[in-house]
Amino acid sequence: GSISDDMVKDFLGEVHGIMTQFDDFEILVWSFDTKVYRKTMLKLTPDTIEDIFNYKMVGGGGTDFMCNWSFMEEDDIVPHKLV
């Protein structure tokens, strides 16, 4: 569902906290509503961990979680975990 800018900051702060618990990781973050906004995809690693605080989510409303599965299939993304 829709979330506020403050909620986005809280969520990304939690993701940052999780990342700091690991020595090595690769996390993909992207925005979606009824489609995935490919240009928003951000790849985070230990070298780019702070980039999460500059991430800007986009979307125009509506929610279709299935677009994520199609996006991952089209881009050969096979997550170990998906949140």
Image (spheres, helix red, strand yellow):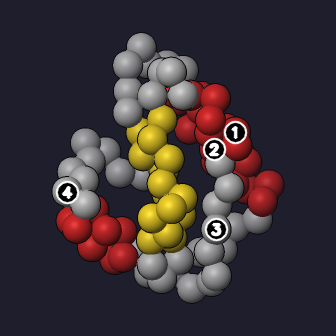
Neighbourhood count class around disc 3 (C-alpha, 10 Å): few under 14, some 14–19, many 20 upward: some
The residue wearing badge 2 is 12
Residue behind mark 4:
76
- Mark number displayed over residue 18: none
Residue located farthest toward the top when viewing the structure as drawn: 23
Q: Look at 53% across and 77% down and name the residue there.
A: 33
Which mark, residue 53? 1
Marks 2 and 1: CB-CB under 8 Å?
yes
Give the mark nearest the N terminus, 1 or 3.
1
Q: Residues within 10 Å of mark 1 (few under 14, many from 20)?
A: few
Q: What is the distance, in whole Å, between disc 1 and disc 4 at their CAs?
A: 27 Å
Left/right placement of residue 29 relative to residue 4 reads left
Disc 4 vs disc 2: which is toward the camera? 4
Would you say 15 lies left or right of 66 here?
right
Q: Amino acid at mark 2?
A: Leu
Q: Earlier in the sequence, mark 1 or mark 4?
A: 1
Question: Quick one: label 4 or label 2, which is nearer the N terminus?
Answer: 2
Residue 26 occupies quadrant = top left
Mark 2, mark 1: which one is toward the viewer? 1
Question: For the residues marked 1 and 3, what is the alpha-carbon distance in whole angstroms?
Answer: 15 Å
Q: Name the kind of residue labelled 1 in the image.
A: Phe
Amino acid type, callout 4: Asp
- Looking at the rendered structure, the secondary structure element under dot 2 is helix
Residue 69 in view (yes/no): no
Residue 38 percent coordinates (x, y): 45, 64
Report how far apart the C-alphas of labels 3 and 4 lie in the structure.
Answer: 23 Å
